[in-house]
Amino acid sequence: MNDRLFAYTLRLADDAAILGQRLGEWCGHAPTLEEDIGLANIALDHIGQARALYTYAGEVEGKGRDEDQLCFLRKEREFSNCLLVEQPNGDFAETIARQFFFSAFMLPFWEKMKASRDETLAAIAAKAEKEAAYHLRHSAEWVIRLGDGTRESHERMQDAIELLWPFTGELFEADDTVKALVAEGIAVDPATMRDVWGETVKKVLGQATLEMPEEGWAQTGGRSGIHSEHFGHLLTAMQYMQRAYPGLKW
Amino acid sequence: MYTQALNNLEAVTDVEDAGRNAAFQARVDNEYKIEPNDWMPEGYRKTLVRQISQHAHSEIVGMLPEGNWITRAPTLKRKAALLAKVQDEGGHGLYLYSAAETLGASREELNEQLLSGKAKYSSIFNYPTLTWADIGAIGWLVDGAAIMNQIPLCRCSFGPYSRAMIRICKEESFHQRQGYELLLTMCKSSQEQKDMVQDALNRWWWPSLMMFGPSDKDSQHSAQSMAWKIKRFSNDELRQKFVDATVPQAHYLGLTIPDEDLKFDEETGHWEYGEIDWSEFARVLKGDGPCNRQRMKARRKAHEDGAWVREAALAHAEKKKARKAQKAA
Ligand SMILES: [Fe+2]
Ligand SMILES: [Fe+2]
Ligand SMILES: [Fe+2]
């Protein structure tokens, strides 16, 4: 098996699955009915991406693990999603900030991934790119509405930006796995996304009358399985059925 | 989902312009659709607003019991299907509120009525989803009962409602099949899962039968709705159709309907069922069901927590408009 490709595909799958899981928590509790539907839509896109990516990771691994075994039967330290996506929903501003930071990265990421020498990843990217474009538009519009809305919404949006800012640095990290796959023309070099991401964020925050936080300390660890305290709780709910009733068909 | 039958409507009488009324009734009798700008008796409008909004509220409150399992769905495929289903229910709520708006009832006003407890929603959603099998049972039984209630509404005399129902019924029948397939998979997989399904059926069967509303002998006010072609079958007729369709489906799954009096009548070709516990129906409708308070609390919390977001969206739209006007000036 190609260990690197497996690890890399799994990271992308975990990012999508965990963000989809978080967004799913909103369903029925959003600020408007339209947002209930909109957030469910975005959740569904991520779950769909996760399914394709886990399935492919399982194939690359070649041990017969399917999408569900990879998603529901791995433990905390085996998950390699970035820290940003596992952050709790918080208030609506936090959910929007998380989505905005992530999608501002993923849109150019998938654009580039379409040219990957790995055909499966390139095909997944082609679909995911369109989805990410919608996610970015949706979240950026909300950043602007909330930033340039009322005093309260402005404060909440600014707080959310500050709160999640330290988790954005991890998006651009490249360890040996990524570097080797970049050299092979399979992976996207995340460092090349920095400028375009920074421009998107700057432009949107500007329109939203929000302040861009200073570059600074970036919290990392997700890619090597060092997660946040609340991550175990997320898995507890997500994996409950497969843990309580192992080996059954649903 | 889930027009709760019209059990709590005041009798509606009209003493309006007799000529217009007769012309209106003639159009209804001839199966012409009534559109929002057409003249209509005030009672017709009121009845429709009440029924459509009650239906819309049911879709929205109905998102809660099923939403309870989104984070815990056993597979990614099921998680996606459940999310998509709950999202559809939200969409149904939207079309229905829009249909009510064509009759001059704003969404804000209708939502206020829900949150204040003044408006009703289908009592079925006051029952809890305790296990994953409940998700299948809701799709099979609750969406199934909703379809029985709603198929006739596709021919409702009021155009916007009838058109909304056509679209909604298509999705509800997809939900029904999906729920049944979920249960079939569980029943085939292991005895433990089959027991879980049986337990879900035991808990959901009677509340599902109650979804059709009081029995005909106790149900007033439906004659006028029948004449207006808002309602086309009586509560008991619809309930019987549901029982006849559902019992063989339960047997196919290898399940037992929790009704000792259930038997097939060879002569009529119908399944006879036992007495429904109408005291439970009345109690839950009045507010004393297992989750009435929790459902309302969840809806109010979402509304209150979201207030600042909705205010911000309005404020932003105003600012944009003002800037545009300034530019134009
Ligand atoms: Fe419905
Ligand atoms: Fe529905
Ligand atoms: Fe449904």
Image: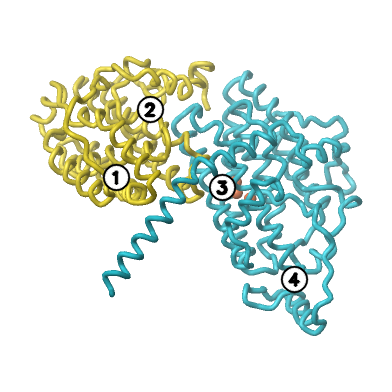
- Say whether disc 4 or disc 3 marks the residue closer to the N-terminus: 4
Q: Are marks 4 and 1 on the same chain?
A: no
Mark 3 lies within 8 Å of ligand 2 (Cβ measured):
yes
Write down the quadrant of residue B6 in the picture. Answer: bottom right
Residue B274 drawn above or below residue A2: below
Question: For mark 2, what is the residue?
Answer: A67
Gap between marks 4 and 3 measured at Cα = 29 Å
Number of residues whose C-alpha sits closer than 10 Å to that of mark 1, classed few (under 14), some (14–19) or many (20 or more): many
Label 3 neighbour load within 10 Å: few <14, some 14-19, many 20+ = many
**Closer mark to the observer between disc 4 and disc 3:** 4
Residue B298: x and y, percent? 59, 37
Rounded to the nearest whole Å, what is the CA distance between mark 2 and mark 4? 57 Å
Q: Which mark is residue A132?
A: 1
Are the residues under badges 1 and 3 in a single subunit? no
| Residue nearest the viewer, comparing A238 with B238 | A238
Callout 1: helix, strand or loop? helix
What chain is colored yellow? A
Residue type at mark 2 is: Glu
The chain letter of the cyan chain reads: B
Q: Secondary structure at mark 2?
A: helix
User: Which chain's residue wears label 2?
Assistant: A
Give, as a three-letter code, the residue at label 3. Answer: Glu
Question: Do the residues at discs 2 and 4 belong to one chain?
Answer: no
Considering only order in the chain, which callout, 2 or 1, is on the residue closer to the N terminus?
2
Residue under the image location 28 percent in, 73 percent down: B328
Name the residue located 60 percent from the left edge and 38 percent from the top edge: B179
Q: Which mark is residue B42?
A: 4
Residue that mark 3 sits on: B89
